[in-house]
Amino acid sequence: MPVYRLLSASRDRREALPLHHLSIEAPTVRHAAARVLGRADEVFGDGTGEAWLVTEDGARVWSVSLDAEEIEAPAPGLVPA
């Protein structure tokens, strides 16, 4: 099964946080991306930032970016609790 590396750069409201690395074993890029999204709170915490998956040979195959406006606004169609 392929191993993807998750690289993430986070920022909180005060400073940039160090780059994080996490290995994810998954059959496909989609499965690996789903695992990343399932761990978004762990990856980003209360901050913003970017995360991307790279293959064993270093090719970037997927990325996501989260900015402060997305964190503070509810998703379209959802009513805040």
Image (cartoon, helix red, strand yellow):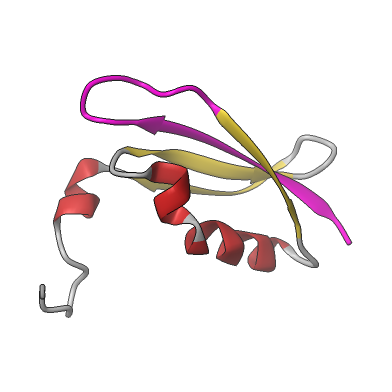
Snapshot quadrant of residue 58: top right
Q: Residue at x 41, y 24 (%)?
A: 17
Image side of residue 80 versus residue 41, left or right = left
Which percent across, then down, holds residue 32?
Answer: 66, 60
Question: Which residue appears farthest toward the right when viewing the image?
Answer: 1
Image side of residue 20 versus residue 42, left or right = right
Residue 40 vertical position relative to residue 47 in the rendered view, above or below: below
Image side of residue 63 versus residue 61, left or right = left
Which percent across, then down, holds residue 67?
Answer: 28, 43
Quarter of the N terminus within the rendering: bottom right
Image side of residue 52 versus residue 26, left or right = left
Q: Is residue 16 magenta?
A: yes
Residue 41 vertical position relative to residue 81 in the rendered view, above or below: above
Residue 69 vertical position relative to residue 31 in the rendered view, above or below: above
Which percent across, then down, holds residue 73?
Answer: 14, 58
Q: Nearer the viewer, residue 40 or 31?
A: 40
Q: Nearer the viewer, residue 15 or 59?
A: 15
Q: Is residue 4 magenta?
A: yes
Q: Residue at x 80, y 67 (%)?
A: 27
Quarter of the C terminus within the rendering: bottom left
Please report the bounds of the magenta region as a residue range: 1-19
Residue 12 vertical position relative to residue 16 in the rendered view, above or below: below
Q: Residue at x 47, y 45 (%)?
A: 43
Q: Residue at x 17, y 78 (%)?
A: 78
Which percent across, then down, holds residue 70?
Answer: 23, 53
